[in-house]
Image: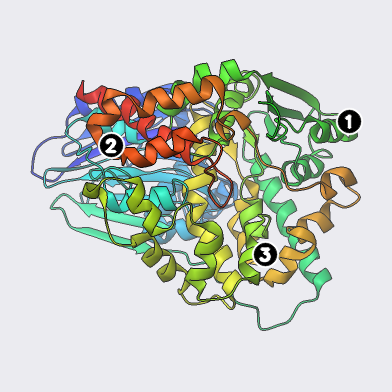
Amino acid sequence: MCGICGELRLDGALSDLAVIRRMTAKLARRGPDHEGIISDGPLAFGHRRLAIIDLSDHANQPMVDKELKLALVFNGTIYNYKALRKELIELGYEFFSEGDSEVILKAYHAWGEKCVERFYGMFAFAVWDMRHLTLFLARDRFGIKPLYYALDGASLRFASSVQALLASGGIDTSIDPVALHHHFTLHAVVPAPRTILNGVKKLSPATTMTISTEGQIAQRTYWHLDASRPALELSEQDWINATRIMLSRAVERHRLASDVPVGVLLSGGLDSSLLVGLLADHVDDLLTFSVGFEDVGEGAEKADEFEYSDQVVERFKTRHHKYLIPNAEVLKRLPEAVANMAEPMVGQDAVAFYLLGEKVSEEVKVVLSGQGADEVFGGYFWYPRMDESTGSPLERFREHYFDRDHAEYLETVTPAYHVPDVTAELVARELAKPDADTFLDQVLRFDATTLIVDDPVKRVDNMTMAWGLEARVPFLDHELVELAARMPPSLRLKEGGKFPLKAIARGLIPDAVIDRPKGYFPVPALKYVRGDFLEFMRNILMSDACLRRGIYNRTYVEKLLAEPEGHFTRIQGSKLWHLALLELWLQINIDAIHA
């Protein structure tokens, strides 16, 4: 797990190492173990390494294969790298390192752009072909690893974070009104290739891009999720058995691809508890980590799930670390967490992951997380509500998911940011893609391939990598997701959702954890906005910077401030926090570079 960046000149000039140094410096927290920079005429790479597989200097990056005339920067983990390495050795390739990075180099030489189809894992990487003077960029199937880029007539620059790209200089930081519409409608999700900034794009998941020094660009989507039923009808037990096999295999892959100890982020929910149960027999002295927060008073949710995580710890005798963080600490650290968000993230658990990541990184370099299980196996409360509703697919989805309908968006922002209902157009287009048998198949696929990328998955990557901690997500193993996508949605939603996982967990983890109501990663102070948190948000939204920026309709802002706990989204997020978070992100990450 690392931070990567690079520049390819398209104007005949030599690459600028000063640009790379500025970007690499911004990626230092993602990779504290080693820094490397190389240049080759129009191309320069920068890399910050978090050493997890092959801890020797042989695996440092940028990695150059002088014989093959290829250079690589890579962020992520290829879980099947040992099998691929064996296959490549049989083809005649010789290796100088023991890790997964060199496997990518050899695989690209052997199989070209189709090498990505053979990779099991999470990855964002760039390969420079010195013979053909082409740059190859790739991102994993679910976009678990980030890859941002800026393209103009003179150069293409890329990096693992928006902040690193901005440090390169000359990036257009004006707000994209279409992205703003997505942001305020899909709780901060801005699907690729857009970001909130006009000058920054991101490579779509399951996509590769090849760029020549003449500026010719070719993109290819290499994977598609089939959400139709298999020809051979399977029984309920068949589906459960297949899920058990696939999940066990995924967990084992994620555990074994490491030369350092692997822990688990244990929330107390079904998903992370199941990971502990599946790992317990294979890992001596398994490390687990939980975090809880301070309640905010009457009417708010309980702020920790220790009563459930403690039962899992007792069952499996893990070496547990439990952290309780007071609200004063959350408020003090909010700006710091926002500064490490590659894009604005309104999910309250982003801050939770940031504060937990700090503690966990003192103990381990790698953890498994339960992210993705709810989207893949139908765990959220809005899925059955959508299923029971009527109307077009868009109408059914919008009624239970959109943070704001289009009319409220127009009320939220000033006329300069008014656009047509572009989010409705995007959602309707995505739901209508082929190979989805039912409306819920459409929804669950859209969630797993688009929404999850820019919501929980991005939060986990950003907030853990800010501390040099690699978080792995076994529930997004692509073979497991492919299996779940072909499963009847009614089976996934049975008994309140995630039925196959509950069936696997029964008898393995405590029943109280399986049968509990669906929990979240609560930071109540960011939902039930009161006291110091209300003043904090008021100061942001009434600041001179916010007024000068002119994004928000002031009447709308005043309405939310007058009744901070009276305006929640359909999935129960604070609309006031949404506005404050975006403005805070812009002040910290954009205004600072123009100061």
Q: Is residue 174 visible?
A: yes
Left or right, 186 with respect to 363, comes to left
Q: Residues within 10 Å of mark 3 (few under 14, many from 20)?
A: some
- The answer to whether the residue labelled 2 contacts the one labelled 3, judged by CB atoms less than 8 Å apart, is no
| Residue drawn at 77 percent across, 55 percent down | 501
Which label number is shown at residue 263? none
Closer to viewer: mark 1 or mark 3: 3
Answer left or right for 504 relative to 468: right
Position of residue 218 measured from the top left corner of the image (x, y, whole percent): 26, 61
Residue 552 found in image quarter: top left
Indicate whether 328 appears above or below 301: above
Between residue 350 and residue 559, name the one nearer to us. Answer: 559
List the residue tagged with mark 2: 6
Q: Residue at x 89, y 35 (%)?
A: 315
Up-down: is 497 above or below 28? below
The three-letter code of the residue at mark 2 reads Gly
Kind of element beneath mark 1: helix
Q: Amino acid at mark 3?
A: Pro
Of 37 and 404, nearer the camera is: 404
The quadrant of the rendering that contains the C terminus is top left
Local crowd size for mark 1, using a 10 Å CA cut-off: few (<14), some (14–19), many (≥20):
few
Q: Which residue is mark 1?
A: 314
Q: Nearer the viewer, mark 2 or mark 3?
A: 3
Residue drawn where x is 55% and y is 31% of the image: 526
Residue 384's disc is 3
The tag earlier along the polypeptide, 1 or 3, is: 1
| Foreground residue among 81 and 11 | 11
Residue 357, image x and y in percent?
58, 26
Tag 1–tag 3 contact (CB < 8 Å): no
Can you see residue 203?
no
Q: What residue type is disc 1 on?
A: Glu
